[in-house]
Image: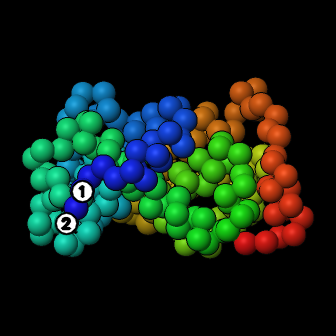
Amino acid sequence: MTLWTESTRTSMNKYSDSFIEYVKKVENAPLMVKGTNAVHSSPEGGLDTVGYGHKLTPEEAKAKKVYGIPFDKITPEKAEQILYMDLAKKEKQLADTLGRRYTALPPKNKEMLLDFAFNLGVEGTVKKFPKFTEAVLNNDMETARQEYIRNYTDEKGTKKPLARNKEFYNTFLQEEAEQPVELSADALRAMVEGNN
């Protein structure tokens, strides 16, 4: 598979630098900072994770390649390319699932939902976090602040908040950093019509 396609190059310009840095930090800080830990075990178990949050498929694990890149050739730059390709896939799934309500959103709101979809999958985002999803789609940051906490269950069965919650809050929800967002006519129309 060709690593860089025209749509991947185009998608690179869609995401803010702060969003990419946030994802890299919460998904694999050692790779971002030291250039180490390109392939590592997944905290949630199962198959390993490569680069910045790419969960291996059984086929990739068997071939020891991601998008045609051998595991031992994954540098921080290659990991970033994989990240962009993964984000583009998730963004397409969000657009297919949420329609105009997603595509008409301001970039910050898109990135908020994209982070959740990257971490939980689109179905997990919409089904497990319906209030958060609706809040972001409606630009209701007050409700989003109340509904954004993601948890995991540890080996003892105790539910605990994910470490990335703090970074998510600081990146997207911190009140003093929030700037008023003017919604496009398409976004307002989609909110009023409730169209997908």
Q: Name the residue beneath numbered marker 2.
A: 60
Mark closer to the chain start, 2 or 1: 1
User: Visible in this render: residue 191?
Assistant: yes
- Tell me the quarter of the image containing the C terminus: bottom right
- Disc 2 residue crowd, few under 14, some 14–19, many 20+, Cα 10 Å: some
- Badge 1: residue crowd in 10 Å (few <14, some 14–19, many ≥20): few
**SS type, badge 2:** helix
Residues 153 and 130: in front is: 130
* Viewport quadrant of the N terminus: bottom left
The structure residue drawn at horizontal position 50% and vertical position 39%, both measured from the top left corner, is 13
**Numbered disc total:** 2
- Is disc 1 placed on a helix, strand or loop? loop
Going 11% across and 66% down the picture, which residue do you hit?
63
> Which label lies toward us, 2 or 1?
1
Q: Residue 16 location in percent, x, y?
A: 55, 35
What's the CA distance linking mark 2 and mark 1? 15 Å
| Circle 1 residue | 2
The residue sitting at the front extreme is 6
Q: Is residue 4 left or right of residue 120?
A: left
Q: Which of the 4 quarters of the picture holds residue 128?
A: bottom right
Q: Residue 11 placed where, x, y %?
A: 47, 47
Label 1 sits on what residue type?
Thr
Q: Point out residue 64 in the picture as x, y percentages from the top left corner.
A: 12, 61
In the rendered view, would you say 106 is above or below 193? above
- Give x and y (percent) for residue 108: 66, 42
In the rendered structure, find residue 161 and report the number of the disc placed on it. Answer: none
Residue at (50%, 32%) from the top-left corner?
Answer: 17
Q: Is residue 37 shown to the viewer in this render? A: no
Which residue is depicted at the point 53% across and 32% down?
Answer: 18
Towards the viewer: 101 or 47: 101
Q: Amino acid at mark 2?
A: Glu
- In this orientation, which residue lies closer to the viewer: 123 or 175? 123
